[in-house]
Structures are given as structure tokens and as C-alpha cells.
Image: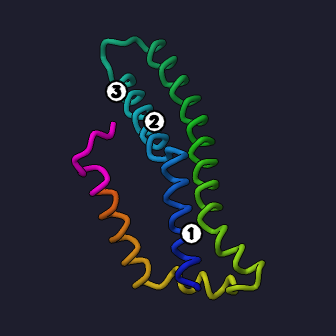
Amino acid sequence: MIVGIYVAGVALFTVTFALTRLPESVRDVTNTARNALQSVTDRDLDEHEKESIAQQAGLKLLKYFGVVTVKGVVTVVAAVFPFWLADVLAIVPWSASVAFAVRLDVLGITTLVLVAAAFFWRHWPTSRT
């Protein structure tokens, strides 16, 4: 039973991670920071333009911080929902679920499976766009 609850948690994490497009949001953060840094170090721009670009980037980064935080919280809540539900329904105690989930062998196997799945998803020859 505990394995099923764990698999449900991992599945919900994976689906929520994909649906929220969390990696794209993090990419937006890094792109904004990189572009701002390039602009600030650009010798062809005057100080006023650099300041304006830096302020705009700062506001964007604050927005992205909120977006990434909300998406991250939603993803984590989705992942722990099966653990919580199993505890509330007295199927498996929360502590037992968490103890299983943080075992090194379980984390290692899960990581390998998810990395392999992501690799094959990206490299499988289909007509997906």
C-alpha cells in the first residue's frame, strides 16, 4: 500500500511539474537576469538606459519570484496530497509514508526512473511538437 501511495505522489508531482511549466518559469528568471547583466555591461548604452533596463529587470524578477514560488508550492502540495490523504483515511500513517519516501534506495530508483523517462520523452522519435 505504501508503494502505491508513493507512486501516486511521484505521479502527481510529475504531472503538476509539467502542467505548471515550472522549468520554463525558471528559464525566464535566468534569461531576464542574463539579459539585464548583458545590458548593464554594454558600453554602448548610457547610464540612464542601463538604469532603466536594470529597474525593469528587477521588477520582472520580483514577478518571476512570485510565479516560481506559487508553482513550486502547488507542485509540492500535489506531491504530498496522497500521503496526507492516506493518513487522514487511516490507511498509512504520515510518518511511515515519509519514512519510505526518503529512503536512499527509493530516492535513487525514483530519480533513475524519472531521468530515464524524461530522456526517452525528449528523444523518442515521434511527431510530437
Mark 1 vs 3, N-terminal side: 1
The secondary element bearing badge 1 is classed as helix
Q: Gap between marks 2 and 3, in whole Å?
A: 15 Å
Identify the residue at horizontal 53%, vertical 47% (top origin).
Answer: 19
Identify the residue at horizontal 51%, vertical 27% (top origin).
Answer: 57
Residue 99 in the image: state x and y as whole percent.
57, 86
The secondary element bearing badge 3 is classed as helix
Looking at numbered disc 2 in the image, what kind of residue is underneath it?
Answer: Asp
The secondary element bearing badge 2 is classed as helix
Foreground disc of the pair 2, 3: 2
| Residue under numbered circle 2 | 28
Residue 63 in the image: state x and y as whole percent.
60, 34
| Residue 63 belongs to magenta span | no
Foreground disc of the pair 1, 3: 1
The numbered dot on residue 9 is 1
Q: Quadrant of residue 97?
A: bottom right
| Residue under numbered circle 3 | 38
Q: Quadrant of residue 60?
A: top right
* Residue count near mark 3 (Cα–Cα under 10 Å), binned few <14, some 14–19, many ≥20: few
Foreground disc of the pair 1, 2: 1
Q: With respect to residue 82, does 117 lie above or below? A: above
| Residue 123 belongs to magenta span | yes
| Quadrant location of the C terminus in the rendered image | top left
Stretch of the chain drawn in magenta: 120-129
Mark 1 vs 2, N-terminal side: 1
Q: Main secondary structure of the magenta part?
A: loop
Mark 2 vs 3, N-terminal side: 2
Determine whether, in the image, residue 22 is placed left or right of residue 65.
left
Q: Gap between marks 1 and 2, in whole Å?
A: 27 Å
Q: Would you say the residues marked 2 and 3 are in contact, meaning their CB atoms lie under 8 Å apart?
A: no
